[in-house]
Image: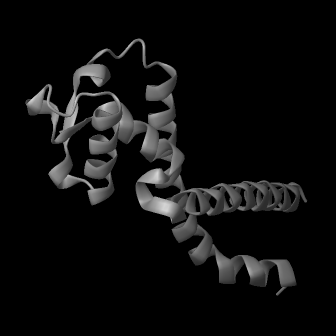
């Protein structure tokens, strides 16, 4: 058996699992990017709020800091424990939802997406060339 075929047979299961995981991550990154690019078309994103009790504690602190800086600490008490949906969409898209490791994780996803794409193209042409002969 040729070396390339051995590598292909060994790595196919791993590539499939990594490819599925990266594909799901890229799906969410694409959807949030679409929502951010067309923010003006989706006015419901400006009015929808998400309760901070279902989010990491950093969101409540960030909300309190913003409300204090804008002088809104005592105004709008019904919005004191919920953040705009735009914050979540932006944080999902940039990876900041995962904290300090989020951007690094997104970099790893981008690198693995690039590797999977290049190896997929190489495998396609190797199989296609072999099928012609």
**Residue pushed farthest left?**
78
Which residue is drawn at the image coordinates 49% and 42% (left, top)?
Answer: 93
Which residue is drawn at the image coordinates 73% and 55% (left, top)?
Answer: 114
Which residue is drawn at the image coordinates 43% and 46% (left, top)?
Answer: 92
Q: Position of residue 53 (x, y in %)?
A: 15, 53
In the depicted structure, whether residue 117 falls above or below residue 71: below
Q: Position of residue 121 (x, y in %)?
A: 78, 54
Q: Nearer the viewer, residue 55 or 92?
A: 55
Q: Position of residue 94 (x, y in %)?
A: 53, 45
Q: Nearer the viewer, residue 114 or 83?
A: 83
Q: Position of residue 26 (x, y in %)?
A: 53, 48
Q: Nearer the viewer, residue 82 or 7?
A: 82
Quarter of the image with the C terminus in it = bottom right
| Left or right for 72, reference 93 | left
Residue 67 is drawn in which quadrant? top left
Q: Nearer the viewer, residue 51 or 77?
A: 77
Residue 46 is drawn in which quadrant? top left
Quarter of the image with the N terminus in it = bottom right
In the depicted structure, whether residue 97 falls above or below residue 83: below
In the depicted structure, whether residue 98 falls above or below residue 9: above
Image mark count: 0
Which residue is drawn at the image coordinates 29% and 42% (left, top)?
Answer: 63
Chosen colour scheme: one colour
């Amino acid at each position: 058996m040729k070396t390339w075929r051995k590598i292909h047979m060994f790595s196919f299961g791993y590539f499939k699992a990594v490819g599925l995981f990266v594909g799901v991550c890229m799906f969410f990154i694409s959807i949030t990017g679409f929502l951010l690019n067309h923010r003006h078309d989706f006015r419901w994103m400006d009015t929808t709020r998400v309760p901070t009790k279902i989010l990491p504690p950093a969101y409540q602190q960030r909300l309190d800091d913003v409300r204090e800086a804008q002088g809104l600490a005592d105004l709008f008490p019904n919005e004191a424990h919920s953040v705009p949906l735009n914050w979540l969409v932006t944080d999902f898209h940039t990876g900041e939802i995962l904290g300090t490791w989020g951007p690094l994780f997104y970099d790893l996803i981008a690198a693995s997406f690039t590797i999977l794409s290049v190896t997929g193209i190489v495998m396609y042409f190797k199989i296609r060339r072999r099928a012609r002969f």
